[in-house]
Image (cartoon, helix red, strand yellow):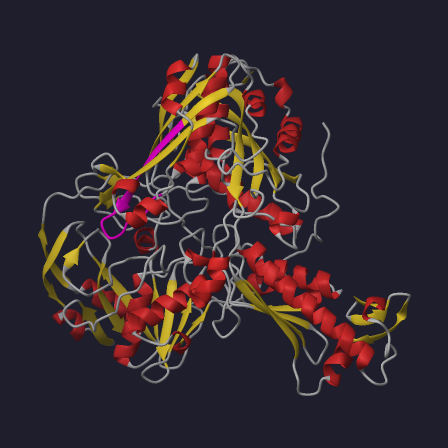
Amino acid sequence: MKTPPVAQPTDGPATTRIDGIAKVTGRADYSADAVPEGLAHAVLVDSTIARGKISRLDATEALKAPGVLAVLTHENAPALKKASAFPMGAAGHRRRPLQDARILYRGQHIAVVVATTREAARHAASLVRVTYQDEAPPEGTLATGETKRMADLDFLSRAMSGDSNRGDPEAALAAAPLVVDAVYTTARTYHAAMEPHATLAWWEGKDRLVVREGSQWVDGAQDTLAAWFGLKRDHVRLLSAFVGGGFGSRIAVYPHAALAALAAREVGRPVKLVLERAQVFLAVGNRPAIRQRVRLGADPSGKLTALVHESANETSRDSIYSEPGARASLSTYAVPNYRAENSVASLDIPPPGWMRAPGEAPGSFAVESALDELAEKAGVDPLALRVLNHADTDPHSGKPWSSRKLREAYALGAEVMGWSSRAAAPRSRREGHEWVGLGMATASYPSRQLPAEARVGVSREGRVFVESRGVDIGQGTYTALAIVAAEVLGVPPAQVDVRLGDTRLPRSAMAGGSMLTRSLGTAVHGAATTLRDTLLDLARRTKGSPLHGRKREALGVRDGRVVALDAPSEGLDFAALAAARGDTPLEAFHRTHPTVLSRVTGALAFTSPAGIRTESAGDASIHSWGAQFAEVAVDEELGRIRVRRLVGVFDCGRILNPTAARSQMIGGMTMGLGMALMEGGHVDPRTAKLVNGDLGEYLVPVQADVPPIDVFFVGEPDPAAGPLGSKAVGEIGITGVAAAIANAVYNAIGHRARALPIDLRNS
């Protein structure tokens, strides 16, 4: 079998992480690692009911416990001011903590105990006595709540609904020779990042706050903390140099951060608050349970004539969160008659939120499973059906694709997986006690851009540095930005120092929506280009320089030196040029505002979606594409499904760092495996209690569960995506995986899985 190349010739250098040594040696500085003088520890007390109010909270015994400094409750906590939640801001919850006695969900923070040690704080927290007044029985599952259309709620919800319509889908369905009408459900799932969420806060005087907080959106967190405490934005310093995983759970800033800062102000010393693992499951968002109805209409050959995608997800009473599954069907296939409709059910649960590929991940399971059902009805190979319905232009916006190597991804994935040998009929391939099947699905994710700022300079030692508030949540931002600067300035990435995650640095886009590399990388490229021009001018204008008097176009940069292009041995190194500047820093700054609105809104563009340039804002529609293939082996006697192999082929434009991008895809595909077979929050409908909210009971894939995963890239630089030519990487890795596995299970044993995680006992 032919083995294709891992990277295209136009891709960047395969580079190991420049922060890798710090991580494996323990020198990486995470939020909870610091131990400032006088440190106190905070532990939260959480509600044990899902709906009602506190009738009495007694902290008498807790206050008597050794080492206790304070116990804050709704009865004595200072007031917090309002902070905007998404889409206007970064607060994870609309409701501020400890401001009243109302209980909206089980796990709501109702008290914070501060003590000299964490052990003392935990003990004292166990002594807090709470009496509740329950109200009506809680509604804790999608099945128990009433769903309402997003478009019928309010103006903002209507704008965020994701509803869409083209043509006349109902008439087309009524006339279609082939129809698929099926409901697909996905369970509530959780981030379970390696690093528990933690905040370390202290005050410098009465009006200056410093917070160490693992964040995917440093600007948003700074803005939210400033709003809660009524501070000027630049009086809040947020530090987030290293983050141990995010997956969406750290885009917003959650109530525990406010309580850590509140406690620090009350006791007059630094306070560290680390969520326990069970609290992480309840306090920082999760993917909600989602129910999707997909209706497909097609002619006898399988050519789509209609697609209706209706999605409903659970949300909280605190705030409305919608996760439109139709994001996966809106533009992927050529279908003239289309409708998307999204609804929510407000429940007595913690507010859900973003989780890797929100909308696209669960939506792709539904639509890609429905397409396999259509392929069976039409008697067509599932891969051939997708090729038949390939969209040559964006059916939603009507614009051409900026680039789309989806057909190439299909072909390469099929070759690597051995798709041509797949038997169409289930139960055709038996190996020992197991039935073997192959499945596939399309992957897609839009490529968007946010405003960003970067500073690039040269130190007195001649090293290049890059500075921005952008963060590295594990996806390789440090290394990607080093590669961008290194390519422009003609140095190896190892000669670039990248400084991130500090609000004293230039502003940045969030690390979410697979937007950071394109957004911040463009700013770094712009700053590095300006700096390169400055270096060239400095070299030709400095007296005594061997390049004095040369024209700029005759000069270039190479190996940390400005050189003559026709005589590379003649030149001046960066250190000498930095010295020639004296006390004037040798650096350049660049800001990108990808939309008119972002330029008009200025600072607000960094703390709200005001600055987002959508995938179809320009002359072309910019998306990343992929094809997911899975091979499974099913033992019906044991009820066991083993994924034996996964293959993913992607078009993400130019790949800046093939090593990191491949790792990102492996991580996403592993997450998709967990979504398909293991992950699901189990909720007691009587109490709305999550009964498996810890890593002992909530199953995630471990090494023994993960098969060989092959990842390939077939894209090429996309000029529409900016000077880097790179499109979205990361979240596309999870899309389509669950459907490919479910479709492979059907090919193996004829079991049609319409619910995740897959349970062979249910059809």
Residue 655 vs residue 572: left or right? left
Can see residue 748? no
Can see residue 107? yes
Q: Write down the quadrant of residue 559 in the picture.
A: bottom right
Q: Is residue 705 above or below residue 205?
A: above
Q: Using the image as rendered, state which of residue 122 and residue 654 is in the foreground.
A: 654
The N terminus lies in which quarter of the figure?
A: top right
Q: Position of residue 497 (x, y in %)?
A: 64, 69
Q: Position of residue 29 (x, y in %)?
A: 50, 68
Q: Is residue 304 above or below residue 242?
A: above
Identity of the residue drawn at 21% across and 68% down: 124
Q: Using the image as rendered, state which of residue 198 and residue 466 is in the foreground.
A: 466
Q: Position of residue 409 (x, y in %)?
A: 63, 33
Residue 716 vs residue 763: left or right? right
**Residue segment shown in magenta:** 308-322
Q: Which SS type dominates the magenta stretch?
A: strand
Q: Write down the quadrant of residue 405 in the picture.
A: top right
Q: Position of residue 8 (x, y in %)?
A: 72, 43
Residue 632 vs residue 697: left or right? right
The C terminus lies in which quarter of the figure?
A: top left
Q: Write down the quadrant of residue 264 in the picture.
A: bottom left
Identity of the residue drawn at 33% across and 43% down: 288
Q: Using the image as rendered, state which of residue 683 and residue 609 is in the foreground.
A: 609
Identity of the residue drawn at 45% across and 54% down: 246
Identity of the residue drawn at 63% across and 30% down: 407
